[in-house]
Image (cartoon, grey):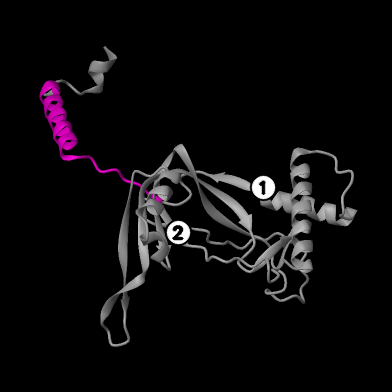
Amino acid sequence: MNLKNLKSRIYEEKKQLVLDSIRQGVEIEETIFTPEQIEEFKEEVVILDYEEIVEGDIDDFDEAEAALNLHEEDDDDCGCHPHEADNECQCPKTYLDFVPMEDGEEYDLEFAIEDRTYYDDAIENYLKIKDALFAEDYEVHDVEVMQEDGTVVIDEKMARVIFKRSKGTITKKKKCMPGMRLAGRRCLPQTGTQKAKMKRLGIKLKRAKKAMGAAKKKKAARIAKITKKRIKGRTRSLASLSN
């Protein structure tokens, strides 16, 4: 580790201590940061800790799929100047996130994996994700790609993994776009050491529909038949209810 990396690590460690103190409401007495930097950190905490639970009816998950980590434009003024290009300064964007909860709503989560090598090496990787999402089961599907000559082949690297009936809730959060870092209320370009090493996976979700088994369907049919015979011939006029 060179001197530059050491200074960067110390800075991040000290900054994290200040962020924790701000969250806990503890007074910051001695620090290497200036009062202006402390105020900037307070603005960062507001963005980092922003979380709004989204009700289940935000989208009709029965008919359409919702994309997680899909950014939406915000109208808030975060302090970027008009002359700054998008790659120089951006405002944090709002996105949907899935928070696993054992007693949450049921959703089918579909992961789009760009490189399946790591996951296919050991089935334990899929099982760990399934347990973390409180899912009942998972399915791995190949991805078909059309070639220039019109033929369709299976992409050996890509995969679609569906975690059936994952339990959790949907929340709205805010973050910076890839390649950007949070600085106060703004998003600025990351430095070389701050850039993410892994690509974010594309994730979609939709309402989980748990199909009834054959036995349950037969039982429901028998109950309906018995009920129909039992109420046959009964009067259904409103006059009889008033007596």
Q: Tell me the number on the disc at residue 203.
A: 2
Give residue 115's position: percent from left, percent from top: 42, 68
Callout 1, which amino acid? Answer: Asp
Q: Quadrant of residue 65?
A: bottom left
Q: Is residue 124 above or below residue 232?
A: below
Q: Earlier in the sequence, mark 1 or mark 2?
A: 1
Q: Residues within 10 Å of mark 2 (few under 14, many from 20)?
A: many
Q: Is residue 106 above or below residue 43?
A: above
Q: Residue at left 31%, top 45%?
A: 209
Give residue 9's position: percent from left, percent from top: 74, 59
Residue placed furthest toward the front: 1
Q: Which residue is mark 1?
A: 49
Q: Tell me the number on the disc at residue 63.
A: none
Of 10 and 201, the residue lying toward us = 10
* Residues in magenta, as a range: 206-231
Main SS type for the magenta part? helix
Q: Residue at left 56%, top 44%?
A: 53
Callout 2, which amino acid? Answer: Ile
